[in-house]
Image (tube, grey):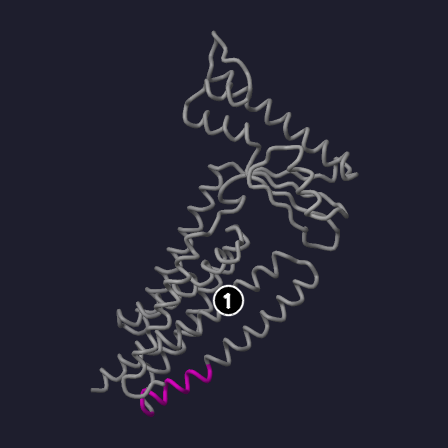
Amino acid sequence: MYSGNNYKKLLVIPLVLAVVFAYFAMHVKPGIEFAGGTMISFPTNSSPEEIEKGLASHFSLEELKVRRASGAISGVIVEFKGESSLEKAREAYASGDYEEVFKALGEPVPADGNITDQAFKLYNSRKTEFTSKLSQFISSEYGVNPKDISVREVGPSLGTVFLSQMESALAFAFVLMSMLVFFFFRKVLVSLAVIQAALFDVLVGLGFIGLAGIPLSLASVAPLLMLIGYSVDTDIMLSDRVLGRKEGTPEQRLFSAMKTGLTMTGTTIAALAALYVVAAIGGVETLSMIALILLVGLLGDLVSTWCTNASILLWISRRSKK
């Protein structure tokens, strides 16, 4: 596989996969934490499908989704972007079109007074009224104690802050990673090889999120950051074996590193597979989602490490030897 110039053909595989997963990555939808919205959780034995149908028939909720809650207590989590008229009023207020706020909420536009303050008060009162009606409906329809209903709202501005922090964390991780690799190996190309491998792993994980229709949330971002650590771990070991040692040929050092690397990744994949099965059976949705994203990302790590990074390091080693 790595004899002669055959290793260069391996570069086609990650290139094709990168294009495929990049396409799905563009279809990732932000969740409540990043896009803003409302999340309501309450204990009930009713099915998510039944609750979603009931809420949709009584309220005009945008991007409504109901899922089973994780944990020992049976319950559901209701997520939605907002109520249609309230969303129109909010967008109108944000754009400065205060008259449209009143029209969206079905109220006449006031002829006098501070229209800005009146629009703000009207929107807040309608929002409070809507939340109260929604809680009362859930309480009466599904027999839930009002004290057991938890309502959590995330504004679009706060979601933007979360998204910005996520992007900063990823950029910071890649910068530190490249500096660390360059410090040890003193080769720019080696640093770029490690960065591309980690970037490929994150792209695979992000593409899978888009393919599976998983909303981008704080929980789904966590495995993406973890994939960077897994990728760097294997790639630094590979770089040290191929470039840092001198015994044997570059191919022999590469195969030695491959045995260690495949053992490391294989044991992690086995552990994550077990975690996914146990979490899925136990109904712990968040944990099973994290395990599944990591599983797919580590399978992508096998491609990026042993097709791309190994080929680059083998080329550098042979060139140095000559």
Position of 133 relative to 10 (above/below)? above
Task: Indicate left or right for 91 with 126 as reference.
Answer: left
Name the foreground residue: 179 vs 122: 122
State the residue at coordinates (61%, 61%): 288
Q: How many marks?
A: 1
Task: Indicate left or right for 54 with 177 as reference.
Answer: right
The quadrant of the image that shows the N terminus is bottom left
Q: Which residues are magenta?
A: 248-260
Position of 27 relative to 176 (above/below)? above
The single residue placed furthest to the bottom in the displayed view is 248
Task: Indicate left or right for 58 with 270 as reference.
Answer: right
Q: Could you say whether the residue bearing mark 1 is in a helix, strand or loop? A: helix
State the residue at coordinates (50%, 67%): 296
Position of 67 relative to 152 (above/below)? below
The quadrant of the image that shows the C terminus is bottom left
State the residue at coordinates (41%, 27%): 95
Q: Main secondary structure of the magenta part?
A: helix
Q: Amino acid at mark 1?
A: Val
Residue 144: % across, % down: 77, 39
Write down the quadrant of residue 55 in the picture. top right
Assess whether residue 256 is covered by the magenta stretch: yes
Residue 61: % across, % down: 59, 36
> Residue under circle 1?
296
The single residue placed furthest to the left in the displayed view is 322
State the residue at coordinates (67%, 41%): 53
Residue 278: % across, % down: 67, 66
Q: Residues within 10 Å of mark 1 (few under 14, many from 20)?
A: some
Assess whether residue 252 is covered by the magenta stretch: yes
Residue 131: % across, % down: 64, 30
Position of 274 relative to 36 (above/below)? below
